[in-house]
Image (tube, rainbow, N blue to C red):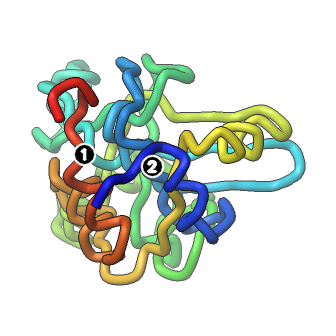
Amino acid sequence: MDLSIADIGSVNYLKPKKGRLLLAEPFMIDDHFSRSVIFICEHNLDGSYGFIINNELNLKLDEIIPDKELPALDVFYGGPVHASNLFYIHQFGDIINNSIKITDGIWTGGDFNQLMEFINLNVIKSNRVKFFLGYSGWSKHQLEDEMKTNSWIISERKKIDVFKNNKDFWKNILENKGGKFKAIANFPLNPSDN
């Protein structure tokens, strides 16, 4: 099957929406977003933001904040905006104060000290929390404009556990969508390698 970047627009019917996934187009050569999968936390008239869920850093939480007694949990690169700030998503908005609901069963933010205390006391499972340095953000209409140039593919989150550490998320999600998306999943990063 001979596909091009224009084919992405012909099969990409979903729109950006809070709780959906944003996948970089296969030829995006960008230090921040190449083959990235972004969990969309907000999308409205003022802009959009989310976290790259498939770019694990070679850092642990206790290394980022060494003056506190923290567990050695994985940290991911969430994106280029405020890349030195720590962010997190979790499934405990019902017990973590000041959490902000993203979608059913997933929150962001909340009381960090309370979160750490609950993890250390085994009140909550640390594999249901994901930490990020930075986030990915778009100003008003920016994401829509990038969608028009076929820079992104939108996917529902069905059966995708955003808390897992899966470097193959990008390929797996496209393959599971089937059809032309399955072919797109196998595009080489460099088209001249084809």
- In the rendered structure, the answer to whether residue 110 lies left or right of residue 47 reads left
Q: Quadrant of residue 40?
A: bottom right
Location of residue 20 with respect to 40 vertically, above or below:
below
Residue beneath label 1, please? 187
Q: Residue at x 20, y 69 (%)?
A: 125
Marked residue nearer the N-terminal end (2 or 1):
2
Q: Residue at x 20, y 29 (%)?
A: 57
The x and y percentages for residue 38 are 45, 49
Location of residue 129 with respect to 91 vertically, above or below:
above
What residue type is disc 1 on? Phe
As measured in the structure, the alpha-carbon distance from the residue carrying label 2 to the one carrying label 1 is 19 Å
Which numbered circle lies on residue 38? 2
Q: Is residue 118 at least partly visible in the picture? A: no
Q: Quadrant of residue 34?
A: top left
Q: Is residue 59 at least partly visible in the picture? A: yes
Residue lying at the far right in this picture: please name it.
45
What residue type is disc 2 on? Ile
